[in-house]
Amino acid sequence: MSSYYENFIAETENNISAKANDMSKGGLSTAYDNSIYADQRLSKKHLGFALKQNVEELDHLLTSFDNKWQPLNGKKYWFTNYDDLLRGLRTIVWDKNVKSYFIDDKNSYLWSEIGLLSFLKREKVKENEEWPNIQFFEVNKIIADTNQFLILGNENTIKRLNNNVINVFVVGIEQVLKNIDVAELYIKIKKEQRDAEGGRLFPIFYTPSSQNRDILFILDNMRSNVMQYPKQRKALACLHCGRCNEVCPVFQCTGDKAYDNIFSGPIANILLPHLETIDDYKFVSYACTMCGNCEKVCPVSLSLRDMIMENRKFFLEKGHLSFGEKQRVKKLHKTLQNRKKLNKVAILKSLKMRKMTTKELRHSRKLTKFEKQSFNQQYIKKLKETN
């Protein structure tokens, strides 16, 4: 296993230039050369560009992947939501009399999203690492032009993939890459992240086979709903690395519980209202201080603040705010445009804040304490002192 890993990394890092000419049709011919792969900053920049382009071309890439699929690759199913997916999985479990399972990575957010462990427990399918009837693998990316799966597993994954049992692969529709060159950029950035965590990346390009009894489940689960919004849909390019959560001041205070979802933090502030229901999750788009910390650490340079602001604008324009919420937004907007009001003494601003907030909010947490002087007043005072 170690030799496979070392050879794969060597190929990725040393033989990229041989494929550079193949990218000319995709409009990225100038990006894919050795200097890009050698420079981490440029790698991130061009991966971010490529992933955002993939989102814009999502329909085309999925159609291409679907058209190239052959019966020799095994079976493939498309599912609108996780309930449909679990019904399809139940059919397999019953038809094949499945009694035991193995999951390659239990900590994957994808298994939490579809509720896989709970489903297997209800179906009385027991975990058996040594002799499973069925195995589950999260596909990190599907490659549109080769019909391969990219799986970031471990040294044991390849052995598992070659077991003569049913292999079920699950992937979200947004996890599609145009070609192998973008996949190698993706691997390079993920390798940097894994190295920083003290772990080891084991990337596998796997070609599905009917002989191995491979089954692919492709899940929408409201991703296509996000695609309706031209600016917010770029959030689907997220790598789910979790770096934004580590630096977000709001997330550090609230943690995962406030979101009550597998998605949390800055990326959830954008996606959740469209993946779930706007009325139930619109509040998360206001759980942002606009500090920009998330954008500084994002490996693919997502404009998270712009997308959050687009959500807020959309909620206001499309009538998703109650009358009271609209009035508070108008008052806040009027106040922020008035320098005299912003420069009022702290006690008056505190009283104004109490009027604008609900009783529930005031009872659940302490309101912000204002400085005696506003930033504008402090700046003018300091300017006078220096002159």
Image (tube, helix red, strand yellow):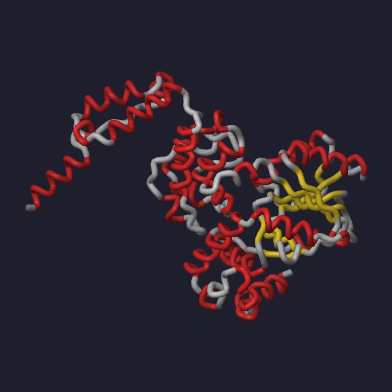
Q: Nearer the viewer, residue 221 or 203?
A: 221
Q: Residue shown at 84%/49% (left/top)?
A: 134
Quadrant position of the N terminus in the picture: bottom right
Q: Residue shown at 63%/70% (left/top)?
A: 181
Q: Residue shown at 81%/38% (left/top)?
A: 87
Residue 141 visible: no
Q: Residue shown at 30%/31% (left/top)?
A: 334
Left or right of 133, for residue 196: left
Compared with 164, 120 (above or below) is: above
Left or right of 123, for residue 331: left
Task: Tell me how many marks there are.
Answer: 0
Q: Residue 114's quadrant in the figure?
A: top right
Residue 365: give x, y in percent of width and height.
40, 26
Residue 8 visible: yes
Compared with 340, 135 (above or below) is: below
Q: Nearer the viewer, residue 292 or 19?
A: 19
Compared with 290, 32 (above or below) is: below
Residue 306: give x, y in percent of width and height.
44, 47
Residue farthest top in this picture? 359
Residue 180: give x, y in percent of width and height.
67, 68
Compared with 363, 43 (above or below) is: below
Q: Nearer the viewer, residue 225 or 12?
A: 225
Residue 49: give x, y in percent of width and height.
53, 62
